[in-house]
């Protein structure tokens, strides 16, 4: 949650399996994460597995891994706000894999995701910070920065230690508000020393300011800790600070 992906507790077999698997995936240890999830059928496990397969380019396997979850969401079997938010994040993977099947489908897909999130946060759990976080991610993907920012602000009011508020740093870079981006990076560092999220924000900001040397310096330090981290590796070549 805080982005402390190298915390020693995440290497302890007594720790929550899904936390360990997600940390492994975020560190870029994708095959390891998939192996850890063998036989796991929870909504979160399905989402982590599908994201890992997608990142590895195993698109057909990722799509197939989502089939059981899509059926569960359609039957309203999921009754937890956090679980339903995880389900929406999984549907975002499927939408990326398949793309809009016909004209107007993208809009329909967006409405479906927002309806599910509305149920998660308004009917199932009014205090679900995860539902609001996924809502922010959906809105950001649709280039709706004002509403995405409002959703992230709600996340922070419910869970100030959630590092996924890095979205505000991404928004700062996209809007060339580099002071804002740096303030987000500083807070991420306060949550987890040597934060990979903070490094991504700073590197993208440096590239947007046309300072590739600074970007590479920031990334080299973070990659020393997380050599397989996919976002760090991508930030080294995304050029122009694009988010």
Image: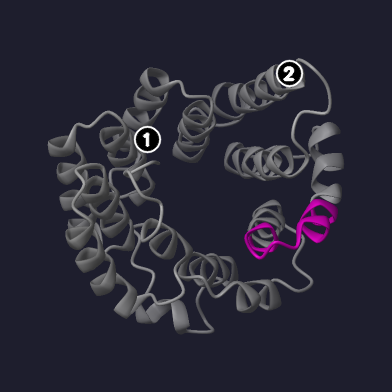
Mark 1 to mark 2: distance in Å? 26 Å
Q: Quadrant of the C terminus?
A: top left
Element type where label 2 sits in the image: helix
Work out whether residue 115 can be spotted: yes
Q: Is residue 114 above or below residue 222?
A: above
Q: Position of residue 124 (x, y in %)?
A: 61, 30
Judge whether residue 59 is colored magenta: yes
Element type where label 1 sits in the image: helix
Residue 155: mark: 1
Which of the two discs, 1 and 2, labels the residue nearer the N terminus? 2
179 or 36: which is nearer to us? 179
Q: Position of residue 187 (x, y in %)?
A: 19, 50
Work out whether residue 193 can be spotted: no
Would you name the residue on which mark 2 appears?
108
Q: Quadrant of residue 218?
A: bottom left
**What's drawn in magenta, residue-wise?**
52-65
Number of other residues with Cα within 10 Å of mark 2, as a class: few under 14, some 14 to 19, many 20 or more: few
| Residue at 52%, 31% in the rendered image | 141
Q: Position of residue 115 (x, y in %)?
A: 66, 20
Is 107 left or right of 19, judged from the image as shown? right
| Residue at 44%, 59% in the rendered image | 234
Q: Is residue 41 above or below residue 10?
A: above
Q: Quadrant of the N terminus?
A: bottom left
Is 108 left or right of 166, judged from the image as shown? right
């Amino acid at each position: 949650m805080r982005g402390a992906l190298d915390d020693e507790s995440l290497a302890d077999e007594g720790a929550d399996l899904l936390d360990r698997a997600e940390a492994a995936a975020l560190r870029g240890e994708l095959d390891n994460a998939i192996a850890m999830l063998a036989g796991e059928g929870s909504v979160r496990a399905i989402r982590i597995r599908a994201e890992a397969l997608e990142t590895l380019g195993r698109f057909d396997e990722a799509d197939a891994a989502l089939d059981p979850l899509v059926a569960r969401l359609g039957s309203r079997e999921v009754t937890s706000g956090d679980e339903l938010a995880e389900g929406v994040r999984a549907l975002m993977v499927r939408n990326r894999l398949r793309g809009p099947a016909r004209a107007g489908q993208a809009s329909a897909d967006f409405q479906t995701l927002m309806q599910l999130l509305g149920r998660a946060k308004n009917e199932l759990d009014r205090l679900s910070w995860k539902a609001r976080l996924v809502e922010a991610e959906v809105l950001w993907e649709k280039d709706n920065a004002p509403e995405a920012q409002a959703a992230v602000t709600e996340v922070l009011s419910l869970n100030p230690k959630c590092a996924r508020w890095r979205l505000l740093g991404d928004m700062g870079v996209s809007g060339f508000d580099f002071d804002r981006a740096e303030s987000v990076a500083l807070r991420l560092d306060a949550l987890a020393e040597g934060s990979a999220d903070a490094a991504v924000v700073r590197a993208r900001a440096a590239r947007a300011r046309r300072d590739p040397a600074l970007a590479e310096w920031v990334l080299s330090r973070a990659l020393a800790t997380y050599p397989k981290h996919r976002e760090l590796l991508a930030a080294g070549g995304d050029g122009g600070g694009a988010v």
